[in-house]
Amino acid sequence: MSNWLKDNISKIKDALFKTRRVIACYDPAEINNESININDEFYNDLFERFIKADIGAELSEEIVSNLKKQIQNQKIKEIDFKNKVKEVIKNTVGAGASSPSIQHDTNKLNIFLVVGVNGSGKTTSIGKLAKRFKENGAKVLIVAADTFRAAAGDQLLIWAERAGVEIFAPLEIKKPDAVVFSAIEKAKKENYNLLLIDTAGRLHSQTNLMDELKKIDQVIVKAIHELPQQYEKLIVLDATIGQNAITQAELFSKAIGLTGIVLAKLDSSAKGGVVLNIMNKLSLPVKLIGLGEKIDDLVDFNLDEYLEGFFM
């Protein structure tokens, strides 16, 4: 196994520690590689633990039901049980298990519109993405399109400095869609090939927010119509809020048609199972997961690596 993969799995295992404690339905120290006794009480307990980890009632029930069909014997070794659970989850989630990684094409104008509610980890994720893209050869411009919250620009500036990239935050432009239009013009003139656009996230004024996002989306589509381009619309979700993350994704996707999900704060949550529920309920790939506060703690989501950390 390559060093980078080992490091990735190690980070994921560390991030999923709280979730793993919730999931564990037996004490490995007491098993000593002996067989686990499987009965209805065991399955009921496993179902409850899946619920606590925010896998969701419907998906949890389906996984447990499929496990019962797969495990015919009443005893199974610990390692075989873990492998069987992973296999059943992958088969149950199905098509949603495929999460293409985030890419940028140096020959195109790459635009990433990043949305999500305030406090979700949106600004932090943008900073981490900026560092990643710059190291991969992109000329990056962070665009501060949340013109209503002064602190948003200040936070972005800190992350832009950490990532070593430029930020576009014109004080004289008050409309978010106008900021985005000017940023695209700047990108064309100064040969930036990757824009990371921060947006407002005030769900208490839901209708206004969604109208604002639709205008930004329309400006981008119109401005890049004749350009070679790649356009991603990513929502940053806070893993600690569990099921509410699904509601948020549905709301934003209805407004602008999202292309993927960034799940932040996975290291702070005992509800890491929400990843599986998101993949099962939404036709959106989980593309990136946040595993900590460091600038490089944002990694491509891979279901096999995730399940390795989930059931180590």
Image: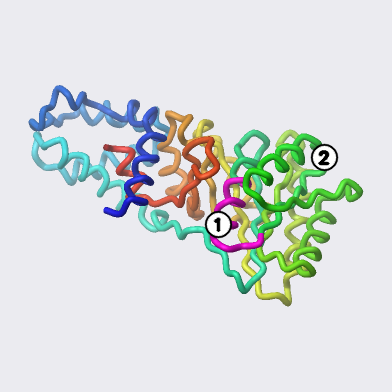
Q: Position of residue 293 (x, y in %)?
A: 53, 35
- Nearest the viewer among 284 and 29 is 29
Q: Amino acid at mark 2?
A: Phe
Q: Is residue 97 left or right of residue 87?
A: right
Q: Is residue 87 visible?
A: yes
Q: Residues within 10 Å of mark 1 (few under 14, many from 20)?
A: few
Quarter holding the C terminus? Answer: top left
Vertical position of residue 107 compared to residue 68: above or below: below
- Nearest the viewer among 223 and 72 is 223
Residue located 74% across and 55% down the image = 214
Q: Position of residue 307 (x, y in %)?
A: 32, 44
What is the distance, in whole Å, between disc 2 and disc 1 at their CAs? 31 Å
Numbered range of the magenta stretch: 126-139
137 is within the stretch colored magenta: yes
State the residue position of label 1: 135
Q: How many numbered marks have been drawn onto this rendered protein structure? A: 2
Q: Is residue 41 visible?
A: no
